[in-house]
Image (tube, rainbow, N blue to C red):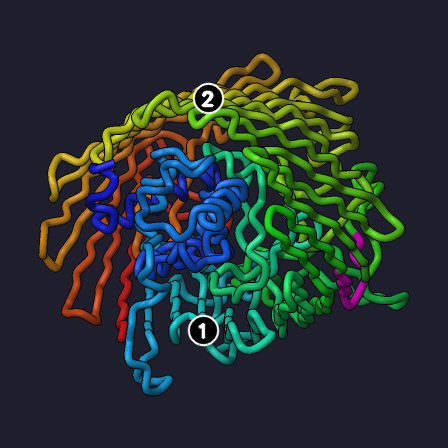
Amino acid sequence: MFLISHGAKAQDINLVEEQIVEQVMDELEEGIDISEFTERLRYYYRHPIDINKTDGTELTELLFLNPFQITSLLQHRAQTGNFISILELQVVSGFDVKTVELLEPFITVNEGYFEKTSVKDFITNSEQQLMLRYGRILEKQHGYHVRDSSRSRYLGDPNRYMLRYRMNYQNDIRLAINMKKDAGEPFFKEKQRYGFDHYGFSVYIRNKGIFKSIVLGDYSLQSGQGLVLWNGLSFGKGAMITSSARQAAGLNSYTSMNESDYLRGVAATLTAGKFEVTPFVSWRKLSGNLIIENEGSVIKSISKSGLHRTQTEQQYRNAIKQFTTGVDWRYKNKRLQLGFLALYNRLNAPYMPEDNLRNLYAFRKPDNTNVGFNYQYTFRNIFLYGEFAHQLSQGWATNNGVIASLHPKLSLFFNYRNYDKKYFSAFAQGLGETRATTNETGLYTGIVYHPNRTFSWLNYIDLFKFPWLRYRVDAPSSGADFLSQLSYSWYKIGELSFRYRYRFKQENTAAIVPERYLADVERQQVRVSFRYKLNEIWEIRSRVEAAFYEKDGVQDYGGLVYQDVFWKPLNKKIQLNSRLAFFNTDSYETRIYAYENDVLYASSFPLYNKKGWRSYINARYRLGRHVDFWLRYAITVYRNEDSVGSGLEKSEGNRRSDIKIQFRYQW
């Protein structure tokens, strides 16, 4: 208890952030922007949540707390009175030492949510921040050198630009502005005659009379277990059991640089006693292939990449119109929470995917209506949750589970999902083996054991089936996913962890045969990670990981070894961290993902593929209280390769290097 009571705020926010991100975002898609989440973490690091005042909403935004832990915290406070110290969390049901250590930097007791200021006017007492980022790949890529206008080529330059502005007035009024141009996109020409390819804007207001929150502009809504509506980031299976139970944050402004999975319009949450109701309406333009025919227009594809570099991508830009409206209703009464959601979504033309057997049950109308009922209930040390969803005149989907604290050292979770092959929702992101909340059933269960404050052992297994055909799977199929991770921690000094993961699934055989059949596919991974703080200035992090893949009797192997070094001198303006990694993979199937440190709010979760080495260095320089500079340089050198990339991304030579420069001014 003495150790936990000291140095909470001294924890490195970068380390805490990395630990959380790696455990809840295992194998996240490359290029996905996670600043929506990391920005939230850093805000609560600067303005800790007062656990004597919160209703639990802010705690759900941290992601690594499951609903059972949040409910237990609120019940403990109601039964015993306000917390006197953060140390009391150790006796709250569902909390272990590791969770308390992660939570410490983001909470406080009796200090309020925000720094005390003598507020005189809105302008002088608002926190404001302006950030500019520049980046580019240094090698010459083929897409920038094609001069023939009849051929596919990049219409813009290889530079990437990002501008973001944030204003926060005591968290009651928040303003967010985003501007972004990707590499290859035109700048002040073509369809981007106004400059940036993407503009985002939102105003968030809270606690105004009966209005709990109001959002104008870009916003996200998360409801239930994500079977009907879940905007923004969603996380699947990982080394935290929180992923088995989604924690719906409700209505929030959308601040991510991702150009998809959000709503644009107006929404508000109104409260009346134990009831909350959130009506919302959205008008957006999407990118996709809209074909205009004599019989009427049809949509052949919808793009979520946010890239508009070529003439074709420019033609697809904002071609599709989307109207969305609905209402989210919630009832909260101590241990019980109920919710009901109705959503209507309409496009300006019917969606018509490729006409094949796999798409026999695909949704092919311009509009659809979904309804969902969700629940949460806590009984002693057991947390029950779930959602039932229905697409009118189509299919059903359900996801239900339980998290139980069987003993202060032992926790169990169990989840069952069943997504009908006819079910479709444009905004669904339910837990599953695939991102599509359709055509899947599964049993997902696991156990977490903490014999003492230093050891932690997690095990889970997910057994799943796909009742109908899928991409590259021309028959009903099944599979399994097993993970076991053992961790040993030195309190705030270091950690050693061992992980084994086994995956089994079925795909079309790659062999040339008269009739295509399904082949068994196995993938195994072994990982050893080590982190140790040598002193107040130096820290090292190491990893060794191996991958094994087998299909049709063909076996492939992959390996990754890396070493990170962090240099953070006390009271110095400059900080450095660097990595040297060696990788060797036989095929793309044995690729290995690894989180990389980056400039502030930038996401870097690349895959290591082929053979070679990779290194990067990050530098941060603080120029006074208000100004910060970041510089990042990364290089990958491949063995036995004459070029890197393919198509328009191809560059000659065996190396690929990237640079980022970032400036922040805050006042």
Magenta run includes residue 376: no
Q: Name the residue located 62 percent from the left edge and 40 percent from the top edge.
A: 431
Q: Left of 109 or right of it: where is 517?
A: right
The residue beneath circle 1 is: 172
Residue 660 percent location from the top left of the image: 30, 58
Q: Which region of the structure is painted magenta?
A: 343-352
Q: CA distance from mark 1 to mark 2?
A: 43 Å
Number of the label disc, if any, that sits on residue 484: 2
- The percent coordinates of residue 448 (x first, y second) are 47, 26
- Foreground label between 1 and 2: 1
Q: Which one is in front, 63 or 81?
A: 81
Residue drawn at x 32%, y 47% as measured from the top left: 86
581 above or below 629? above
Tell me the SS state at disc 1: loop
Which residue occupies the foreground of this view, 221 or 546? Answer: 221
Quarter of the image containing the C terminus? bottom left
Q: Mark 2 packing: few (<14 Cα in 10 Å), some, or many (20+)?
A: some
Q: Residue at x 75, y 55 (%)?
A: 300
Kind of residue sitting beneath label 2: Ser
Above/below status of 447 relative to 52: above
**Please, what secondary structure does the residue beneath circle 2 have?**
strand
In the displayed structure, 592 sits above or below 200; it is above
* Label 1 with label 2: CB-CB less than 8 Å: no
The residue closer to the viewer here, 89 or 227, is 89
